[in-house]
Image (cartoon, rainbow, N blue to C red):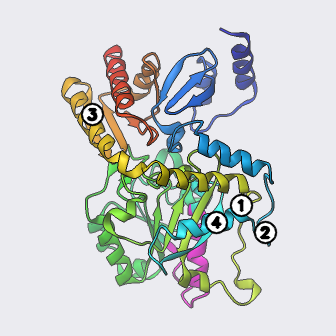
Amino acid sequence: MRKDTRRWIDADKAHCWHPFTPQQAWTESEALVLVRGEGSWLWDSEGRRYLDGNSSIWTNIHGHNHPHLNAAITRQLGEIAHSSYLGFANPRASELAERLCALFPPATLERVFFSDDGSTAVECAMKMAIQFRQQSGEPERDGFIAFDQAYHGDTLGAASLGGVARFQERFRKHGLPVRFVADLDALRALPADIVATTAALVIEPLIQGVNEMRPWPAGMLRALRTWCDTHGVHLILDEVMTGFGRTGKMFACQHEDVIPDFLCLAKGLTGGYLPLAATMTTGRIYDAFLGEPDRAFYYGHSYTANPLGCAAALASLDVFEQEQTLDRLQPKIARMTALLGELKSASPRVRDIRQCGFIAGIEVDHDGAAVCLAARDHGILTRPIRDTLVLMPPLSTTEEELATAVEAIARALEARP
């Protein structure tokens, strides 16, 4: 082991605290130190190469070290790295908000509130939904409806919407009022008094991520839009994972021609380069915050609308157009389907394959974490959700690289009986 690798690992184990990581097991294991990326590949401090099988926790879109994104960030760095967005504007934020709104029909989602990550994007939507009701003569509408096994982030409000007990149960009594339902039938069966006191319904459209990559039935999103309109409930779509091409369209909601009242974006917004989030909403909701100062939305972060992040996001949108990312993605989605079908047929350890666009979950018979660890020896990095292996590489991944990824998983399954 190289001297620098040893030093970095020792410092990590002495001082760092990792997210979603049992620290006891971490300190007793040998860490992998990632130091470089190029396209769909990552290198560790020992010079070993790995395919980025989960897009660096579902963030990277166009590959690592993309020249257009690099140039945009460098150019912005030559002007200014950060300035306050509290009472000031900056060019990149203005341009980004305009381009995001232009991705939707006119007079629909026409306002953008920037924050830092997916959790805060959802938090913003929740607080906006509550304050809108208070300022629109419906203060009794202060509850939310979410779905069993949902995951919407870890800040306290967003965590209230989470249906995964391991992550949220210990904080449940400290959060906002949320009623959980399993599906459309359960939603339609809710008592009238619950519906009448609901501000908004929240869902991960098309597919639940942390629930082991489980797709929703076709048509469900359109049915939810109709139900919300009928009952005067706002629809919040959490597209933190599904946004920016992951499902085959720019946004998951476009598969069923649904426009939400709030759209939450993060992860792929900057192409996976920098922390930035956006909560998009309608002019009607925005207008309810105009008037006296006490009607303002008093919420924000120090790095809201950070110019470097906005520059990266603008560059990412450029790349979608310049490289025809969505058009070129379609045959790769079909290739992923075929490769995973072959894997399921060949390996008795694969219980199920769940796929939505360029997102896939490979459910194995046991010990998903051990399979992911074994997969490192065959050149792929990913993480499991329980016993479901996530395959969600950058959209720039080639068909040949996809085949390499699935072959590495197959070999890892053989290595872990």
- Counting from the top left corner in percent of width and height, residue 37 is at 58, 30
**In this orientation, which residue lies closer to the viewer: 35 or 376?**
35
Circles 2, 4 touching at the beta carbon (< 8 Å): no
Tell me the kind of residue under disc 4: Glu
Q: Is residue 63 above or below residue 259?
A: above
Q: Residue at x 51, y 81 (%)?
A: 141
Callout 3 environment at 10 Å: few (<14), some (14 to 19), or many (20+)? Answer: many
Which residue is tagged 3?
Answer: 340
Mark seen at residue 86: 2
**Is residue 273 visible in this depiction of the protein?**
no
- What SS does tag 3 mark? helix
Quadrant of residue 300 within the rendered picture: bottom right
Q: CA distance from mark 3 to mark 4?
A: 40 Å
SS for dot 1: loop
Marks 3 and 4 close (CB-CB < 8 Å): no
Which circle's residue, 4 or 1, is located before the other in the chain? 4
Q: Which residue is mark 1?
A: 304
Which residue does the image show at 53% across and 70% down from the upper left? 101
User: On the image, numbered disc 4 is attached to which residue?
Assistant: 95
Amino acid at the residue labelled 3: Leu
Report crowding for label 2: few under 14, some 14 to 19, many 20 or more residues within 10 A (C-alpha). Answer: few
Asked if the stretch drawn in magenta spans residue 332, the answer is no
Label located before the other in sequence (1 or 2): 2
- Position of the N terminus by quadrant: top right
Marking on residue 113? none
